[in-house]
Image (cartoon, helix red, strand yellow):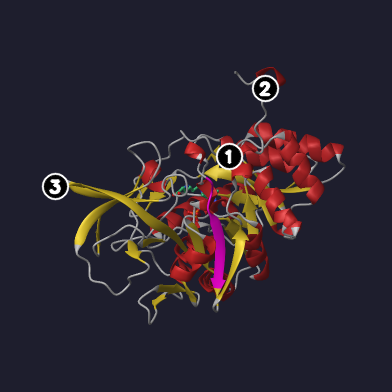
């Protein structure tokens, strides 16, 4: 997919760059991102929303992959940006991302984060709970400012892939519950607090969703709620934020819809429900993360050792693992892979791909069909653009890999590989331990 092909040498090529050459030049493990595909995904969203005729903002959920170069792309493609910490905010500001298009999320924003975000002049806070609501109002007041807020509500719809459930359940750490009256109370308070400008409500129903049903159910509930607070509290919502969660294809069998299908279904529901109530059509905001960067990423590993247990399994070990991709260990996530240096070779054996960390759970792929794998082969794991680099760690003091963007035959390092000095850079040995034994 994207710009990936097998070139004349039988090597996997992405963005016009031979991955075997990339491995030689930058080392492995290496995150390779197909820049043209990232931009294509951004445009699919922007074009689809433009097509609805509604006012909109598409905020890239930067938690999926937050580095300065990615913020630049989001900016250039006309996206807004969703951040959830001072670190993501800092990254965006350092990249020159326009603060007015930054939305700040999170269930436990600290006073320092709120101050930093107000000082930067961000566009909107997505307020998660009553403590934050009052803290934000107070801090904005001290700064003699009025800040835009959306209220995150939990609509009682949860969607995961094919399953969606209408729970009315209250047990979530996020947001104001719609069912138990706290969302209503939050709207009332927010509309009365002097330093807050209430723009509307936000809901996020899950991640890696393959259907539109859950989104439509959430929009319906939000619309009913909007009408209720209009009628009873005389409050109008100029903005409805439908969150993220649009699915991607990791492996065969994953059946995401085209971006436009999600967008049209959501816009349709909004238009239908709000028009029926004579409600001024709100802007739609959304927050895709995974579906912007997920399928653009490929991780390249070098195969090292292997262990054959006759009649049981063959383990093939690579030079990375749960440190660069914790998703299989955390979520039992599944991935597809191929040998990047032998793209035309027929599959010959079923192996399981292990990482190099010191624990049995560090497996990247169970039971995958590959050509006969030997030491020195390059394994390319697909669809690692989202929640991989973003969730990478230094467990076992493994250095985080470099990230390169490839496009039109050009490769640019956007994150350098960590050095040993980076690893020990924050370590401090107290003076009293400096005596070296004889
Ligand atoms: N908006 C909100 C409020 C969110 O909580 C999330 C994701 C998004 C947007 C973006 O959702 P996306 O379009 O990426 O599905 N680490 C997990 C995924 C956690 C998602 C958390 N929230 C994983 O690797 O699968």
Residue 309's spot in the image, x, y percent? 18, 45
Queried whether the magenta region covers residue 262, the answer comes back as no
Answer whether labels 1 and 3 touch (C-beta < 8 Å). Answer: no
Queried whether the magenta region covers residue 404, the answer comes back as yes
User: Looking at the image, is mark 2 or mark 3 nearer the viewer?
Assistant: 2
Q: How would you rate the neighbour count of disc 1 (Cα within 10 Å): few for under 14, some for 14-19, many for 20 or more?
A: many
| Residue that appears at 50% across and 67% down | 22
C-alpha distance separating marks 1 and 2 = 57 Å
Q: Which mark is residue 310?
A: 3
Closest to the observer, 288 or 324: 324
Closest to the observer, 420 or 100: 420
> Which quadrant is home to the N terminus?
bottom left
Magenta residues, as a range?
Answer: 399-406
Q: Which residue is mark 2?
A: 434
Residue 323's spot in the image, x, y percent? 46, 45
Q: Is residue 136 above or below residue 433?
A: below
Lower sequence index among marks 1 and 3: 1
Answer whether labels 1 and 2 touch (C-beta < 8 Å). Answer: no
Residue 394's spot in the image, x, y percent? 52, 41
Q: Which residue is mark 1?
A: 183
| Residue that appears at 39% across and 36% down | 358
Closest to the observer, 190 or 412: 412
Judged from this view, the residue extending furthest toward the left is: 311
* Residue 120 horizontal side relative to residue 66, left or right: right
C-alpha distance separating marks 1 and 3 = 59 Å
* Residue 18 horizontal side relative to residue 429, left or right: left
C-alpha distance separating marks 2 and 3 = 50 Å
Secondary structure that dominates the magenta span = strand
Lower sequence index among marks 2 and 3: 3
């Amino acid at each position: 997919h994207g710009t990936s092909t097998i070139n004349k040498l039988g090597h996997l090529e992405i963005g016009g760059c031979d991955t075997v050459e990339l491995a030689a030049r930058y080392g492995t493990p290496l995150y390779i991102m197909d820049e043209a595909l990232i931009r294509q995904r951004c445009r699919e969203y922007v074009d689809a929303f433009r097509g609805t005729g509604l006012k909109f903002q598409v905020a890239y959920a930067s938690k999926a992959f937050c580095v300065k170069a990615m913020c630049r792309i989001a900016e250039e493609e006309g996206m807004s940006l969703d951040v959830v910490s001072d670190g993501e905010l800092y990254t965006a500001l350092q990249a020159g991302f326009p603060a007015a298009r930054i939305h700040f999320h999170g269930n436990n924003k600290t006073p320092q984060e709120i101050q930093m975000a107000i000082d930067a002049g961000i566009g909107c806070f997505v307020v998660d709970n009553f403590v934050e609501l009052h803290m934000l109002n107070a801090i904005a007041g001290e700064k003699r400012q009025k800040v835009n807020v959306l209220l995150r509500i939990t609509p009682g719809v949860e969607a995961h892939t094919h399953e969606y459930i209408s729970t009315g359940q209250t047990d979530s750490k996020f947001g104001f519950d719609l069912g138990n009256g706290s969302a209503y109370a939050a709207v009332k308070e927010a509309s009365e607090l002097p330093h807050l400008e209430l723009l509307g409500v936000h809901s996020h129903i899950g991640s890696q969703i393959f259907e539109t049903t859950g989104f439509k159910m959430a929009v319906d509930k939000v619309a009913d709620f909007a009408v209720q607070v209009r009628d009873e509290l005389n409050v109008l919502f100029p903005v409805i934020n439908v969150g993220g969660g649009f699915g991607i294809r990791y492996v065969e069998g994953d059946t995401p819809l085209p971006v436009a299908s999600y967008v049209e279904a959501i816009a349709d529901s909004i238009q239908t429900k709000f028009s029926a109530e004579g409600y001024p059509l709100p802007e739609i905001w959304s927050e895709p993360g995974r579906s912007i960067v997920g399928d653009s990423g490929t991780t390249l590993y070098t195969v090292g050792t292997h262990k054959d247990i006759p009649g049981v399994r063959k383990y093939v070990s690579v030079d990375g693992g749960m440190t660069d991709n914790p998703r299989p260990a955390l979520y039992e996530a599944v991935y597809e892979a191929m040998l990047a240096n032998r793209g035309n070779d027929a599959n010959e054996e079923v192996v399981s791909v292990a990482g190099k960390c010191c624990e049995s759970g560090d497996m990247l792929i169970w039971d995958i069909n590959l050509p006969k794998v030997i030491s020195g082969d390059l394994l390319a794991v697909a669809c690692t653009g989202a929640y991989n680099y973003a969730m990478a760690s230094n467990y076992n003091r493994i250095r985080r890999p470099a990230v390169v963007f490839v496009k039109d035959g050009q490769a640019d390092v956007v994150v350098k590989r960590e050095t040993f000095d980076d690893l020990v850079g924050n370590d401090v040995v107290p003076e009293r331990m400096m005596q070296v034994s004889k």
